[in-house]
Amino acid sequence: MAITVKIPAQLRPATGGEGEIEIESAGTVGDALDAVFAQHDGLRERITEDGDLRRFVNVYVSGEDIRFHDGLETTVSDGAEVTILPAVAGGR
Amino acid sequence: MSLEGLRCKECGTSYPLEALYVCDRCFGPLEVTYDFSAIDADSQKRKIQAGSNGIWRYADFLPFSSRPASALEPGLTPLVRADRLAERLGVAEVWVKNDAANPTHSFKDRVVAVALAKALELGFDTIACASTGNLANAVAAHAAAAGVESYVFVPADLEEQKLLATAVYGTNLVGVEGTYDDVNRLCTELAQERGWAFVNVNLRPYYAEGSKTLAYEIAEQLGWQLPDRLVCPIASGSLFTKIGCGFSEWIELGLIEGELPAFHGAQAAGCGPVATAYAAGHDVCRPVRPDTIAKSLAIGTPADGPYALDLARGTSGSIESVTDDEIRAGIRLLAETTGIFTETAGGVTTATVAKLAEAGELSSDDRIVVVITGEGLKTLDAVRDGFEMHEILPTLTSFAEVVDDRSSVAF
């Protein structure tokens, strides 16, 4: 089963306007992102820096922040949804 | 006019003054930039003093090119000299900035008034927010006063007082199963899909500017002077850093003289990602799952955490965390020494001041400002069972027997 990667509005110019990208099954979040970069190379430098996520980029697997798990090593099961979002927060 | 544009805090890329909040290039947060070179300190002070009795007296330092208006203007809340609290803490001067005195009883009225005025200027007809309560109250009230449609998203398990004090204004109240961070993620996604002004998402650069007015008021109310220390709660870190920003602007322009005060941040131990990073010497915060009675501070992924760390370290301040019991004691300490009843966030702040005093971190000649951001009536559960009531019959004898006997011990 495929995995869906949701792309935030700010990054859609780099995907030709696509808000969702389907990829084949991936082992980890890092693998999933590599598969996305293979389709849209322009995304790599926008999301990562020296192989790590930029500090204001958050990634969720089925709604769970990957920083609660193993970061880019977090496992992605088949059919899961990977969401990339800007790390903005702050209301109360 | 001094308003310039938006700029990424991380990489410096410039953007126009629109409903943008994140840098397309690096995802860093955007902030408003100004050119204040035309401002003359003395004439600006006179202009401020002749201004409105609220935050719009500082309009020249806010993100508007023409003077904003609002039907429910917040600000100019009391700065109360708290000698009995100072005595308990063993310091010269303590001032309590009581922001519970705003229209919906928290500092959130400041940021919402600015965000709403900007949303209307940008042509939005609906405003919305992700909130843990205080912001919900403010968005619903200010939208009602302005006659604007609003949507308020909150964690479904929020304190009943905060739900009722939001719903009463006639907003679309949406309870989301999950934590504030879940609500915030949902709103970040919704902001992309709906053409709404989410005050703390796509209007965040403007919204955050409203917090600077707390710094301006403190300085003006102290007679155009700075305190030595400032103690302020940290949730996302936006309020904390924007108070620093407000003081810095006025120091640079010569409206006030001196150095930034030592900035002490206050967090709950049950949700203290910034305090933890501070103690560990880290530059970024590891997210946490909140578990504290201070729900208004329960942000596990603080967006401005890195900047709050910089400010505390750069001013020889600190970032502390206090337990739920210390928070309850903090609420009582403030109430018993100043007559001000604050919510759990204010308990966190007061407990932090007490902790700093006990640790010998405060000097006896310090002038300290304690920023109290919200109202005690909103979090009554926190003080439930914390007191005793004398129960008597309606007779003099009963009063004498029950009350006199017990209270005589106290005198």
Image (cartoon, coloured by chain):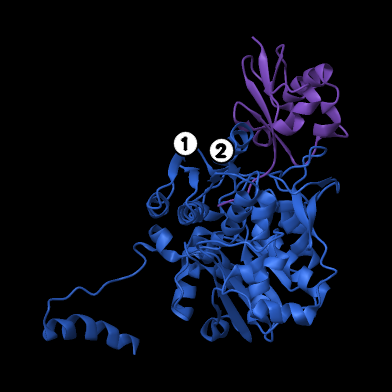
Q: Which residue is mark 1?
A: B177
The residue identified by callout 2 is: B182
In this image, B37 relative to B204: left or right?
A: right
Which chain is tinted blue?
B
Going by the numbered disc 1, the residue's amino acid type is: Glu
**Quarter of the image holding residue B312?**
bottom right
Residue B80: % across, % down: 54, 80
When the figure is inspected, residue B135 is found, relative to residue B36, above or below; the finding is above
- x and y, in percent, of residue B179 in the image: 52, 41
The quarter holding residue B69 reads bottom right
Check whether the beta carbons of the residues at disc 1 and disc 2 lie within 8 A of each other. yes
Q: Colour of chain A?
A: purple
Residue type at mark 2: give it: Asp
Q: Which residue is most to the right?
A: A50
Quick one: B52 or A44, which is closer to the camera? B52
Q: Position of residue B198 (x, y in %)?
A: 59, 44
Q: Nearer the viewer, residue B397 or B300?
A: B300
| Dot placed on the residue nearer the N-terminal end, 1 or 2 | 1
